[in-house]
Amino acid sequence: MVSENGRLMRAAVIHEYGDSSVLKNETAAVPEPGDDEVLVKVLYTSVNPMDWKMRAGYMKDFIHLKMPAILGIDVAGVVEKTGRSVKRFKTGDKVFGRASASRGGSYAEYTAVKEEQLARMPNNLQAREAAGLPVVAGTAWGALFEMANLKAGQRVLITGASGGVGLAAVQFARNAGAHVIGTTSGANAKLVKEMGANEVVDYTKGDFSKKVHDVDVVLDTVGGDTLSRACSVLKRGGVIVSLTGPVAPGVAEKLGITAKYSSVPSDGSRLEKIAKEIEAGRFRIVIDREFPLERIGEAHVLSESRKAKGKIIIKI
Ligand SMILES: NC(=O)c1ccc[n+]([C@@H]2O[C@H](COP(=O)([O-])OP(=O)(O)OC[C@H]3O[C@@H](n4cnc5c(N)ncnc54)[C@H](OP(=O)(O)O)[C@@H]3O)[C@@H](O)[C@H]2O)c1
C-alpha cells in the first residue's frame, strides 16, 4: 500500500466481510488529515459490538466500507498533526473521541478524526481508560438525557446493565439522582450495584418484567424479547430508548408510552461534559480485558459472545 505522505503504519485490515478471521495484521498508509480533521497517534482503541456487526457485513446497507477497510471507532491518543481549519487542538494534545470506520478507523497506529468528534482527555484519565468511553458513554448520555430527558427522582430501567453502555448508563443515572434498576446475570449483580444501581434483577431467573413496575424511562441495550418485555414496565407517559432495533409497531400507542430508536449521533461536546464527570471523580470505566492490536480477532470473539463485563480495550 503506498502512502500520500510516504509513511506506513501497523493496522488491522479487512479485505472482505466475514468472521473474525478476516481481520489481518498488515501495513497500511498513514492517512492525511483533511482541513477539518486531526491526525491522532492512536495509543488505545476499544471493541464495540458495532465493529463486529460491520465486519460481518450486517450493517453494509447503512455503512459503506471501501475495501480494504480499517475498523475501529473509539480512539484515545495524541494529536500528531492538524488540518488547516482545526482550531481547538494542536500537536501534542492528548485527545479521545470517535473515528469513522468508513473513513478509516482506529485499529491502526494513526487515524484521521473530524475535529468536532474529539475532546481533550481529562488529566485524571489514562489513555487506556479514555479509549473505552466515546461510544458507550456518549451513547448512554445521549440516550438518557437528550432522548429520554431523565430527571432526578425518576425510576429508570437499564437492561444489559453490565455491558459497556449499561455500566456507563447506571453511573450517569445514579449521578442524576434517578432510582436505578439494572438487569444482568447473577454473576455481575455485585458490580452493577457497586456502580450505582439501587436494584438489580437477574434476568436468568425468570421474566424480569414481572418484577419491575412504574418505570419512567427504559434504556434497552439488549433487544429482541427483552425489548418487548421492557415496554410493559413503563408507566403511561414513560419513554423507552432502544439501541438495537425499534419497538414493534402499535405497542407504544397501546401502552401510552413513547418509543425512540435511533443511533445516538456522536458529538465531541458531549464527551467534554463526560470528561467533567470524570474529573469530578463521579464516573469510572470498567475494563473486562485488554488485548494487543495483533490479537484483535480474539477481542472480537469475546465481544460477539455478548458476555463482556464492561469494555474490551485494544493496545496499539
Ligand atoms: N444505536 C446506537 O447508537 C448504539 C450505540 C452503542 C451500542 N449500541 C448497541 O447496544 C448494544 C449493547 O452495546 P454494549 O457495548 O453495551 O454491549 P456489550 O458490552 O457487548 O454487552 C455485553 C453485556 O450484555 C449483557 N447481556 C447479554 N444478554 C443479556 C440479557 N438478555 N439481559 C441482560 N443483559 C444481557 C451481558 O451480561 P451477562 O453476562 O450478565 O449476561 C454483558 O455484560 C449492542 O447491540 C450495540 O451494538 C447501539
Image: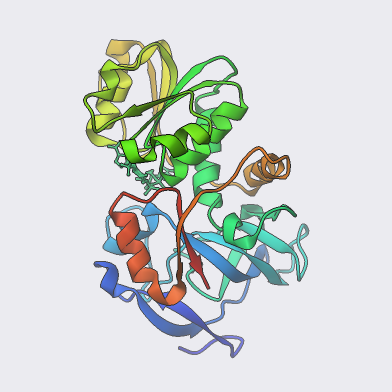
The residue at 32%/49% (across/down) is 307
| Residue 3 lies in quadrant | bottom right
| Residue 20 lies in quadrant | bottom left
The residue at 38%/40% (across/down) is 188
The image shows residue 15, relative to residue 223, as above or below, that is below
Q: How many marks?
A: 0
The residue at 63%/42% (across/down) is 270
The residue at 29%/30% (across/down) is 227
Left or right: residue 177 compared with residue 160: right
On the image, the x and y values in percent for residue 266 come to 54, 47
Left or right: residue 268 compared with residue 171: right
| Residue 82 lies in quadrant | bottom right
Can residue 142 be seen in the rendering of this structure? no
Left or right: residue 277 compared with residue 247: right
The image shows residue 135, relative to residue 230, as above or below, that is below
On the image, the x and y values in percent for residue 232 come to 29, 17
Left or right: residue 65 compared with residue 129: left
On the image, the x and y values in percent for residue 244 come to 33, 40
Can residue 186 be seen in the rendering of this structure? yes
On the image, the x and y values in percent for residue 301 come to 30, 62
Figure quadrant of the N terminus: bottom left
Ligand 1 falls in which quarter? top left
The image shows residue 94, relative to residue 208, as above or below, that is below
User: Is residue 29 or residue 166 the one in the foreground?
Assistant: 166
